[in-house]
Image (tube, rainbow, N blue to C red):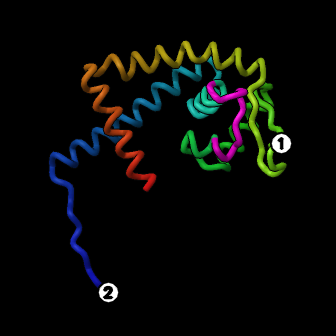
Amino acid sequence: MIETQVQWLTDAEQAAWRAYLRGSRSLEVALGDDLEDVGFSLAEYELLSMLSEAPGQSMRMSALADLIVQSRSRVTHTAARLERRGLVERTTCESDGRGVLLVLTDEGRSAVSRAAQVHVESVRRHLVSQLTPQQFEALGEAMQAIRDGLRD
């Protein structure tokens, strides 16, 4: 067995890592709490908002799962909850007959429009207003670099 040396985090790296973990989790909780006031979880809102921006307000469920970085089974469960509430419909993909499209209903459009106002205000209050414009831009660049690195 070949042993490798672990490059432990420095004190500064450890502090930054823990600040990221706690900050990102706290932010998700705050955003989720605000959306719960209008009847949505953060995962439900993200799914609906991505559908609302998609051409024809519909997407293949597999593509939606990739876009919102959730497992296909989680997207299926979330879609089922939203479908029971009349906010989305599942249909067969006409192009190949195998895929499943998730389509935003008129009721879903209205609901996501109302929730968007709450969500945007929440993002501004809990994230944007906590940072300088330069910090916010740097945060976006850093998170894009991480996402790009994880795709490879």
Sequence-first tag of 1 and 2: 2
Residue occupied by mark 2:
1
Q: Which residues are magenta?
A: 53-63
Identify which amino acid the numbered label 1 is placed on.
Glu
**Residue 18 is inside the magenta segment:** no
Q: Nearer the viewer, mark 1 or mark 2?
A: 1
Q: Quadrant of residue 5?
A: bottom left
Q: Position of residue 110 (x, y in %)?
A: 70, 14
Residue at 23 percent across and 42 percent down: it is 16
Q: 66 or 83, which is in the foreground?
A: 66
Q: Is 57 situated above or below 145?
A: above
Identify which amino acid the numbered label 2 is placed on.
Met
Residue at 43 percent across and 56 percent down: it is 152
Mark 2 closeness class: few <14, some 14–19, many ≥20 residues within 10 Å: few
Residue occupied by mark 1:
94
Q: Is 3 situated above or below 28?
A: below
Q: CA distance from mark 1 to mark 2?
A: 53 Å
Q: Secondary structure at mark 2?
A: loop
Residue at 65 percent across and 24 percent down: it is 52
Report the residue that reaches farthest toward the left.
11
Q: Position of residue 80 (x, y in %)?
A: 76, 38
Q: Is 95 situated above or below 5?
A: above
User: Total label count?
Assistant: 2
Question: Would residue 120 appear left or right of 146 to someone viewing this image?
Answer: right
